[in-house]
Amino acid sequence: MPTKAPITRAYCVQLDEVLSIAEARRAFFSLPEPRSRFDFLCSSEACRALGTKVTAANYDKQPNETYKAAHFRENPHSSHAPDCEWMADEEDEDADGKLPGESEAEARQRHARRKLHDYIDVFEPPVERARPSADKPEMPTAPTRKPTGTPDEAPAPRNEKKSANQRTSSLERLVECYRQARLELGDDEFKAMRLRVVGEGEMPLGAYFKAIKYAKLGNANRVLQGGALLVDRYGSGFKLKFYDRIDNKPVFLYISKEQMDAYRFKGYLDGLLREEVDYFRVFAMGELALSPSGKSLDLRVADLRQLVLIPGIKKAPATEA
């Protein structure tokens, strides 16, 4: 039986846990080289009992290496169980026009979402963790098994409509949803996309993202974004400098060696920083503060789950004269 809803989570055989495609990529690039691709089964236990395979595309590539976003899709050689969570409800999600009880705005959003590999309705910002001390770093630094049902991507309740229950606390997944929506949707379709942020309420998806040049001192409660250059490395730590200024002051993002070493996906993030690219697109949730000298601003990110880096265009290899 074919699926109807976009598959946003799958069971990774090698890691023995259910992952979003963003988590799969972080886990993959955290492995030492040479790496082997993961095998995926459907997240539904009934489907896994049938051996239902799921295809994962582009999770083994960095975002700057492929035009198509990383995503899960149905494996044409595997069938899903009738009660699979990715089966459509009786109210067909592919229906044109309005569904019974649906508003015009909800219909526009549903039509726009059909063009996306993944979408987010509800975002629960990750709770900040205290920065680890040098003598008590948070461990582990590589992927470990999490109990099924407790990943960043928690399954939606079966008695609720699937289209209204794509919930995540993964900033990376939210960023991928935002980037794909900007790429794949027209202006009116993008404006129709809504996001409910836990603790704040509902807003347009685009309103939750703010360009760094428009940010103010303090905690913005928004995803700040902007292009930045890697200006220094401190062991595994690093410093980025944004292209845009605020009040004519340069803006920096500094992550210490201790903070990097305590990060579960250190290998993934470190690999991104080693890419020979012209710039990085930064998406971060943090606090803007004046530096001790008062001559610059610091974007302070307390938890690396609140930071997403997208590499820019790879630099062309130097040619001999």
Image: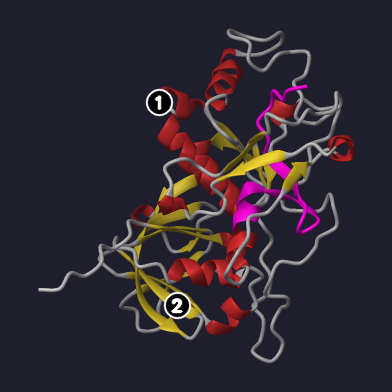
Magenta range: 1-25
- On residue 186, the disc is 1
- On residue 294, the disc is none
Residue 268, image x, y percentages: 56, 66
Residue 309, image x, y percentages: 47, 60
- On residue 238, the disc is 2
At horizontal 65% and vertical 61% (from top left) the residue drawn is 27
Q: Is residue 264 visible?
A: yes
Q: Quadrant of the N terminus?
A: top right
The residue tagged with tag 2: helix, strand or loop?
strand
Asked if disc 1 and disc 2 are in contact, CB closer than 8 Å, the reply is no
Mark 1 Cα within 10 Å, few/some/many (few <14, many 20+)?
few
Residue 224, image x, y percentages: 45, 55
Scheme of image coloration: secondary structure
- 172 left or right of 83 in image: left
Above or below, comparing residue 177 to residue 30 in the picture: above
**Magenta run includes residue 4:** yes
Above or below, comparing residue 243 to residue 67 in the picture: below
Q: Quadrant of the C terminus?
A: bottom left
- 187 left or right of 106 in image: left
The residue tagged with tag 1: helix, strand or loop?
loop
Image quarter for residue 86? Answer: top right
Image quarter for residue 53? Answer: top right
Query: Foreground residue, 10 or 221?
Result: 10
Q: Amino acid at mark 2?
A: Phe
**Magenta run includes residue 125:** no
Q: What whole-number distance in Å separates the C-alpha atoms at marks 1 and 2?
A: 37 Å
Mark 2 Cα within 10 Å, few/some/many (few <14, many 20+)?
some
